[in-house]
Image: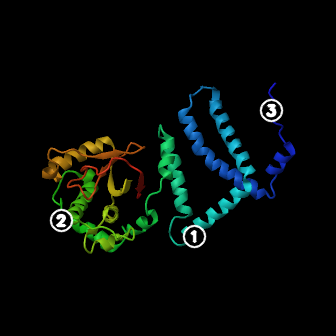
Amino acid sequence: MMKFPKIDLPYLKSKLQVKSPWDRIIIMLLSLFITIPIFIILHQNLIDLEWAFNLDRVFIFIFVFAALFFLLMYLRTIIILCVAVYLLVLFYGTVIGNYGFSEISEDYNSMIYTMSDNPYPQDIIVAKLLPFPNKSKIINAIEYQNPRVRNFAIMATSKHFKGIRGYSDYRTIIQCFAVFKEINSRWNYVNDPKEGDYIATASESLDYFSGDCDDHSILMAAAVRAIGGTPRLIHTKGHIYPEILIGSMIDLEKVNYLIKNVLFVKESYGKKIHYHIDERGQVWMNLDYTATYPGGPFMYEEILGALTLN
């Protein structure tokens, strides 16, 4: 007859006994924050038993929360120490204008919102956990409110496609394409120093229109955002490039017509428009320095991370 190991209840009780009510509160909040994304993954992947009032999902949530709570309480000394260190790091990031409390809150809310609308929510967590290279430096370098950057973007809209009429709904996108045309027609690729990555600010790149892929992406994103466009940066294997938000598939059809028949007729003749559709069904178009028209070929297909600038 199989004998089960005896559970030392006094020992377990001593492990779960807290020294202060704040320990229990911190562990409870941390358990809740972890439970929510795990529950979304389970909800999307487990068969719906169709119980009344969704009781099966309620039990799943309670079970996951309870399991995490008791596990974290068992390791509370280490957990509390890690939480304290993490809060200090976030406080320091907030003070110096780097990644702080506001950014972690936005990332968490964005992750939960995105997961709830995605059939594979676990992929969203993986994408969030993958580090975006030099994220804080890149965000600070995208100086879309710098007068030099905005003046450059305005100059580009006056130089290219100013006479286009009849597409008022896509005026901002057309003007962003003018920025793309101006930057890519002047960009000179130059490697970073051997010692490591050099992140040039958008205003710095305006002096010579030279740099590597992240410098180009920073300038493009800053100029596009300076005139009302929504850019994002894509991280692939050894490469970063910018994209612009087009909108829905209906918008893509109209923008595709504009590119091929009005704005970049010669450059795009007989060629394919390249884009990505994100987890919300929104269309993003490639603006890489290697492209001669918006939606040009990707250098690398695999996406390892995305940095959206709203």
- 104 is higher (above) or lower (below) than 196: above
Residue under numbered circle 3: 4
Q: Is residue 146 left or right of residue 19?
A: left
Among numbered discs 1 and 3, the one appearing first in the sequence: 3
Which three-letter amino acid code belongs to the residue tagged 1?
Tyr
- 113 is higher (above) or lower (below) than 19: above
Q: CA distance from mark 2 to mark 3?
A: 80 Å
Q: Residues within 10 Å of mark 2 (few under 14, many from 20)?
A: some
For this orientation, the residue located farthest to the front is: 1
Residue drawn at x 68%, y 39% as measured from the top left: 62
Question: Is mark 2 in CB contact (under 8 Å) with mark 1?
Answer: no
Nearest the camera: 302 or 182?
302
Quadrant in which the C terminus appears? bottom left
Q: Residue 289 lies in what quarter of the image?
A: bottom left
Q: Residue 79 lies in what quarter of the image?
A: bottom right
Secondary element type, mark 1:
helix
Q: Is residue 226 left or right of residue 294?
A: right
Viewer-nearest of discs 2 and 3: 3
Viewer-nearest of discs 1 and 3: 3
Among numbered discs 2 and 1, the one appearing first in the sequence: 1
Residue drawn at x 28%, y 50% as measured from the top left: 298
Secondary element type, mark 3:
loop
Quadrant in which the N terminus appears? top right
Among numbered discs 2 and 3, the one appearing first in the sequence: 3
Which mark, residue 30? none
- 5 is higher (above) or lower (below) than 79: above
Nearest the camera: 96 or 192?
192
Residue under numbered circle 2: 159
Q: Residues within 10 Å of mark 1 (few under 14, many from 20)?
A: some
